[in-house]
Image: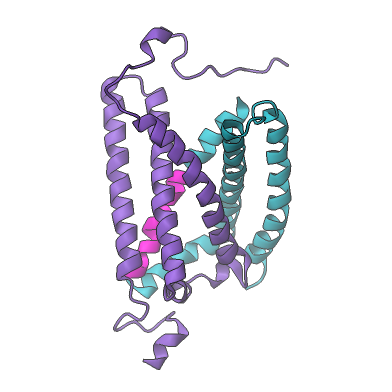
Chain colours: A cyan, B purple
């Protein structure tokens, strides 16, 4: 049940970011200055933490989505759904740790 | 500590026998269900690749400016990558939000209004994004800053 709640919440969060992200990228059609100025906002530390949260949501949604596919299409998926959820959480940590080290050192590192 | 439980949307409010509609709707819901799974698998690859190339390689997010985007879209590979990502992610997300609206907005008028807003937003974003990818000019006339290096060769 909680994976279902988590999947919905992360899905909605990612969708709203996607709407904004297409709009900000569209500024490349306005002018290089406009795009570079707005994208600059993504580089400050507060936004950096927001991006970390966004990627955390995406990685969970991705792995849990693959778990849903496994449950729906794999004969033994239903039987192993709980174990698959643990795999999702473990994989999430395995991906997030190196991502956070790299991304946060870029965001907070002197540039 | 007792774990709280969250009931399935609308459970207990509508008799189960009224939940299943017979005929008339075709197999749209089944196609939508299948689309979520197929597009989901493709999106995992597209978005993980997108995040890796844009955030992990080189200077990460600090490298992103007009020149970075121009450099990527100079190649049809990234144009198609981003176009696929745009369409699949928008349709996948729209169908997900549609499901959530259907689950929680119980008044007919509320549901229709929310879905109308959703579909308008979807069409606007998909059309806008597609136009941007295909009408993009990496070396716009009159621009001076943040241009990709290959513009100077003109």
Q: Is residue A67 toward the left or the right of residue B146 in the image? A: right
Q: Residue at x 57, y 42 (%)?
A: A61
Could you say where residue B3 lies in the image, as x and y percent from the top left?
A: 67, 18
Q: Please tell me which residue lies in front, B138 or B21.
A: B21
**Residue found at the far front of this picture:** A75
Could you say where residue A107 lies in the image, as x and y percent from the top left?
A: 62, 63
Q: Is residue A95 above or below residue A71?
A: below
Q: Is residue A91 toward the left or the right of residue B110 in the image? A: right
Q: Is residue A41 toward the left or the right of residue B60 in the image? A: left
The image quadrant that residue B26 belongs to is top left
**Residue found at the far bottom of this picture:** B153
Q: Please tell me which residue lies in front, A28 or A89.
A: A89
Q: Is residue A11 toward the left or the right of residue A79 in the image? A: left
Specify whether residue B87 is painted magenta: no
Q: Is residue B74 above or below residue B6?
A: below
Q: Please tell me which residue lies in front, A98 or B88.
A: B88
Q: Residue at x 32, y 80 (%)?
A: B140
Q: Is residue B99 above or below residue B13?
A: below
Q: Quadrant of the N terminus of chain B?
A: top right
Instruction: Give, as a single range, the part of the protein colored magenta.
Output: A14-29
Q: Residue at x 69, y 63 (%)?
A: A105
Magenta region, mostly helix, strand or loop? Answer: helix
Q: Residue at x 56, y 60 (%)?
A: B49
Specify whether residue A27 is painted magenta: yes
Could you say where residue A25 lies in the image, as x and y percent from the top left?
A: 40, 62
The image quadrant that residue B154 belongs to is bottom left
What is the total number of numbered labels drawn onto the structure image? 0
Could you say where residue B97 lies in the image, as x and y percent from the top left?
A: 41, 36
């Amino acid at each position: 049940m909680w994976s279902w709640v988590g999947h919905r919440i992360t899905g909605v969060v990612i969708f709203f970011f996607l709407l904004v992200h297409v709009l900000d990228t569209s500024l490349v059609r306005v002018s290089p200055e406009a795009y570079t100025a707005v994208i600059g906002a993504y580089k400050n530390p507060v936004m950096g933490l927001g991006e970390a949260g966004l990627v955390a949501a995406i990685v969970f949604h991705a792995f849990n989505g693959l778990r849903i596919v496994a449950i729906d299409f794999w004969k033994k998926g239903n039987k192993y759904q709980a174990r698959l959820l643990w795999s999702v959480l473990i994989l999430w940590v395995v991906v997030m740790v190196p991502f956070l080290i790299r991304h946060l050192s870029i965001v907070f590192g002197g540039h | 500590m007792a774990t709280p439980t969250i009931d399935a949307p609308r459970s207990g409010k509508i008799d189960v026998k009224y939940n299943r509609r017979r005929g008339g709707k075709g197999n749209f819901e089944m196609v939508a269900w299948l689309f979520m799974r197929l597009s989901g698998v493709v999106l995992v690859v597209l978005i993980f690749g997108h995040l890796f190339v844009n955030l992990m390689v080189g200077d990460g997010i600090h490298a992103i400016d007009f020149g970075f985007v121009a450099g990527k879209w100079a190649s049809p590979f990234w144009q198609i990558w981003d176009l696929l990502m745009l369409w699949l992610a928008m349709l996948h997300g729209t169908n997900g939000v549609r499901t959530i609206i259907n689950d929680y907005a119980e008044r007919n008028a509320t549901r229709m209004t929310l879905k109308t807003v959703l579909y308008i937003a979807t069409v606007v974003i998909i059309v806008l994004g597609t136009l941007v990818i295909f009408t993009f000019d990496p070396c716009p006339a009159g621009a001076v800053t943040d241009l990709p290096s290959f513009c100077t060769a003109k």
